[in-house]
């Protein structure tokens, strides 16, 4: 750096020194100092033509780069996004919320008016830090250029330190234009959450020895802790003989789903979730969303159930159920230690008997799992079932990296596609409009690998229509991405929830505002943004179209008509 530089120059240089390579954003006047500084730096600017698209792309990029960082210490998984003052930040809040729920390590920034101008209340004025605060680990404004190096270093560290998540910095235009002789500060190492309280680790092991039918419920903090944490989950399951489920609304692969002791992700419904958690001992590891989609009338977990809680996030330990053993620490390190205790203290015959219980339950649930998404066809129906679509995707691209917002197609996918660690991410927050831009960001991240995987965005038509202009960014940057739209031409999730909430049958409700009539021509929409668009009307067409899309570089959007 030169002896004198601006705050914007310092911002760009510091990010580059920290290993950041991409800056996602949508620019405005208050961001012009940063846009000008980018011309002299090494960061690649990625334009999203809506701020929420930019945030979603940055989050998908960060979640994917986190997986890469588990195998390469030189990778900084931080996603950085720059938004335009108050309305721009407000536009980005939907996917900022979803990024918080997925634990994406994000640095979100926004320009702001000059400090000596705000008393006149110029257009676009607002309280940026308060706006962002509820969705961030830390939200602050840089009020002095000399404070920028420390605040930027702190923001990056807070985002990357487990439990990971978004942070926000407001960057006033005058601070970004001010000259300074400050240098970027060293980032320093990012710690894990440690091995937990040894006494609580031993107590957890003792409780598992005493259990009759232990069940592991694994949340997404396991996958976020690294592939070694997923391996530790397998080690703990095998050492304890426990049945294994993913938490409700689980959105990453926390356990290989073809393992003998894996049963299912817990459905976010009171009847099914409560049934599968009806046991004497539950171990909640890395959970954050293990509750139902809608209000439940009775407790999901019996008050007498022994509960062991393990998380790198202290807030989640004992949050919704009393913890009989409570451990704050890295999920992988903690599970590994408990498994070591069990290998010495649990009788092999007991372990084998528990595994036999798991096998019996899996056999009893097999037909139910098989029916997920395999809805019967009405007479004359030519569209694909969700199960047929999912089965074909798996047959054509079993090793792809999947980014999901399939909504009512999701559980057909999760029950029919065997998944390995680091192969799947999804929208954990539930707000639509995350999956498509996250797919674009994930594909950008994957392209940085020596042997990039094929990236498939699997979204519903309702999800696609939130931010179809995400495809503009994919085409603009020549992203190799295949988007498969499971298109039932309605908000099916709302129809299902109407019946569950209000009772009656589907024929009893009008479902106002829940059908797409007239339908949007999704292939033409994709083509208008620069991608290749394909319409698939019958199940027999899926394999050929999908195979060709995967084999062709660039961005394809495949609109597959499905029936409910």
Image (cartoon, rainbow, N blue to C red):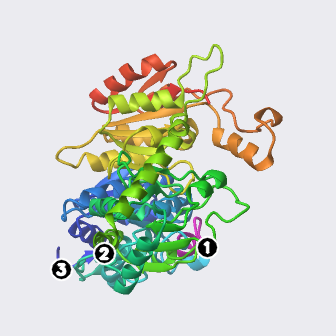
> Percent from the top left, x then y, of residue 530?
40, 32
Marks 3 and 1, how far apart at CA? 67 Å
| Magenta-tinted stretch | 121-132
Residue 134 appearing in the image: yes
Reading the image, the residue beneath label 1 is: 304
Q: Which one is in front in this view, the residue at disc 3 or the one at disc 1? A: 1
Position of 25 relative to 204 (above/below): above
Tell me whether circle 2 and circle 3 mark residues in contact (CB < 8 Å): no
Residue occupying the point 45% across, 73% down: 210
Decide whether residue 12 is among the magenta residues: no
Residue occupying the point 47% across, 73% down: 309
- Decide: few, some or many residues near mark 1? Use Cα within 10 Å; few <14, some 14-19, many ≥20: few
Position of 16 relative to 500 (above/below): below
Marks 1 and 2, how far apart at CA? 25 Å
Reading the image, the residue beneath label 3 is: 3
Marks 2 and 3, how far apart at CA? 58 Å
Does label 2 or label 3 sit earlier along the sequence?
3
Given the current orientation, which residue lies at the most extreme front position? 349
Given the current orientation, which residue lies at the most extreme top position? 380
Q: 108 or 146: which is nearer to us?
A: 108
Does label 3 or label 1 sit earlier along the sequence?
3
Decide whether residue 131 is among the magenta residues: yes
Q: 379 or 514: which is nearer to us?
A: 379
Position of 557 relative to 37 (above/below): above
- Is 553 displayed left or right of 415 in the figure? left
> Percent from the top left, x then y, of residue 516?
66, 32
- Is 147 displayed left or right of 219 in the figure? left
- Asked which quadrant contains residue 80, the reply is bottom left
Q: Secondary structure at mark 1?
A: loop
Q: Secondary structure at mark 3?
A: loop
């Amino acid at each position: 750096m030169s002896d004198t530089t601006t705050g914007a120059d310092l911002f760009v240089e510091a990010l580059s020194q920290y290993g950041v390579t991409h800056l996602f954003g949508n620019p405005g006047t208050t961001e012009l100092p940063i846009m000008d500084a980018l011309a002299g730096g090494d960061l690649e600017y990625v334009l999203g033509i809506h701020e929420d698209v930019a945030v979603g792309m940055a989050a998908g990029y960060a979640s994917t780069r986190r997986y890469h960082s588990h195998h390469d210490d030189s990778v900084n998984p931080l996603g950085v996004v720059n938004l335009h003052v108050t309305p721009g930040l407000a536009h980005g809040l939907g996917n900022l919320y979803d990024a918080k729920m997925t634990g994406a390590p994000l640095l979100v920034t926004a320009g702001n008016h000059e400090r000596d101008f705000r008393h006149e209340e110029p257009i676009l004025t607002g309280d940026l830090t308060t706006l962002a605060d509820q969705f961030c680990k830390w939200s602050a404004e840089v009020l002095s250029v000399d404070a920028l190096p420390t605040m930027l270093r702190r923001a990056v560290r807070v985002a990357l330190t487990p439990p990971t998540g978004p942070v926000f910095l407001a960057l006033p235009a005058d601070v970004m234009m001010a000259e300074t002789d400050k240098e970027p500060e060293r980032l320093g190492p990012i710690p894990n959450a440690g091995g937990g309280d040894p006494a609580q680790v031993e107590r957890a092991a003792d409780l598992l020895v005493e259990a009759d039918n232990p069940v592991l419920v694994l949340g997404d903090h396991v996958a976020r802790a690294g592939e070694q944490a997923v391996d530790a989950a397998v080690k703990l399951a095998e050492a304890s003989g426990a049945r294994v489920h993913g938490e409700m609304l689980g959105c990453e692969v926390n356990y290989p789903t073809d393992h003998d002791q894996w049963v299912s992700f817990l459905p976010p419904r009171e009847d099914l979730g409560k049934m599968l958690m009806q046991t004497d001992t539950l171990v909640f590891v890395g959970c954050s969303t293990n509750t139902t989609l809608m209000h439940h009338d009775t407790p999901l977990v019996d008050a007498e159930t022994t509960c062991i809680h393990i998380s790198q996030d202290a807030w989640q330990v004992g949050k919704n159920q009393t913890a009989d053993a409570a451990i704050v620490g890295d999920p992988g390190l903690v599970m590994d230690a408990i498994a070591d205790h069990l290998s010495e203290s649990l009788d092999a015959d007991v372990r084998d008997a528990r595994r036999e219980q798991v096998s019996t339950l899996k056999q009893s649930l097999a037909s139910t799992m098989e029916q997920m998404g395999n809805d019967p066809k009405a007479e004359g129906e030519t569209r694909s079932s969700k199960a047929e679509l999912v089965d074909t995707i798996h047959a054509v691209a079993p090793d792809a990296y999947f980014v999901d917002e399939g909504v009512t197609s999701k559980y057909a996918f999760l029950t029919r596609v065997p998944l390995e660690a680091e192969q799947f991410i999804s929208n954990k927050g539930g707000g639509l409009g995350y999956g498509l831009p996250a797919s674009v960001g994930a594909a950008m991240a994957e392209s940085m690998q020596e042997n990039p995987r094929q990236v498939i965005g699997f979204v519903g038509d309702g999800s696609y229509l939130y931010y179809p202009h995400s495809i503009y960014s994919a085409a603009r940057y020549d992203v190799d991405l295949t988007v498969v739209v499971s298109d039932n031409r309605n908000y099916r999730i709302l129809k299902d929830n109407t019946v569950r909430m209000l009772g009656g049958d589907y024929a009893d409700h009008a479902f106002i505002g829940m059908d797409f009539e007239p339908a949007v021509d999704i292939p033409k929409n994709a083509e208008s943004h620069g991608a290749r668009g394909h319409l698939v009307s019958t199940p027999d067409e899926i394999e050929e179209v999908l195979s060709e899309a995967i084999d062709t570089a660039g961005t394809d959007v495949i609109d597959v008509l499905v029936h409910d």
